[in-house]
Image: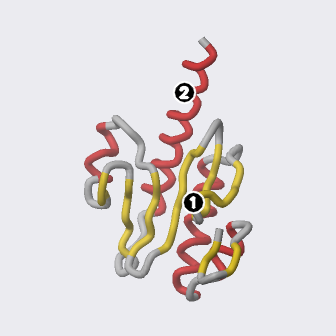
Amino acid sequence: MTMNGAKIDNIDEYISGFPESTREILEQIRSTIKKAAPQAEETIKYSMPTFTLNGNLVYFAAFKNHIGLYPAPAGNDAINIELSHYKASKGTLRFPLDKPIPYNLIDRVVKLRVQESMNKTKTRRK
């Protein structure tokens, strides 16, 4: 994968390609994800930082005006109202760079994705 023509092999390289203010946000998102899913592994997929746990858990990426987080958790009414402020399309959350990033919400999203991943694994084993 490439970014501005350069091959990106890991999340550190991905983050280093952005302005300092965006790098700080990306590092905080990365840290939030690691804390919420300590057993997840880091990689790059689809040219985006990715965390995997029994498959793809969550991706994030920086754009000119927002940070994208993929996918949003499915079928959780308790969090869907909060997420509705950030949903751009099915499974996509967009956090505008000109507003505070909701790290606590990202933490909850990742924890829900971990639950979804674990439930999938349990279902497959049966």
- Secondary structure beneath disc 2? helix
Q: Nearer the viewer, residue 1 or 53?
A: 1
Q: Position of residue 74 (x, y in %)?
A: 38, 38
Is the N terminus in the top left, top right, bottom left or bottom right quadrant?
bottom right
Residue lying furthest bottom: 19
- Position of residue 99 relative to residue 91, above or below, is below
Q: At 64% across and 53% down in the image, what residue appears?
A: 35
Q: Contact, CB < 8 Å: mark 2 with mark 1?
A: no
Give the class, few, some or many, for how many residues have Cα within 10 Å of label 1's Cα (few <14, many ≥20). few
Amino acid type, callout 1: Tyr
Q: At 53% across and 34% down in the image, what residue appears?
A: 115
Q: Nearer the viewer, residue 29 or 42?
A: 42
Is the C terminus in the top left, top right, bottom left or bottom right quadrant?
top right
How far is disc 2 from disc 1 in space, using C-alphas? 22 Å
Q: Nearer the viewer, residue 89 or 80?
A: 89
Which circle's residue, 2 or 1, is located before the other in the chain?
1
Location of residue 124 (image quadrant)? top right
Q: Which mark is residue 106?
A: none
- Position of residue 67 relative to residue 121, above or below, is below
Q: At 57% across and 60% down in the image, what residue appears?
A: 46
Q: Position of residue 104 (x, y in %)?
A: 46, 57
Q: Nearer the viewer, residue 37 or 69?
A: 69
Which residue is denoted by mark 1 in the rendering? 46
- Position of residue 34 relative to residue 37, above or below, is below
Query: Of the residues tagged 2 and 1, which is closer to the observer?
Result: 1
- Secondary structure beneath disc 1? loop
Amino acid type, callout 2: Lys
Left or right: where 26 falls relative to 65:
right
Residue lying furthest top: 126
Q: How many marks?
A: 2
Q: Position of residue 90 (x, y in %)?
A: 32, 49
Which residue is denoted by mark 2 in the rendering? 120
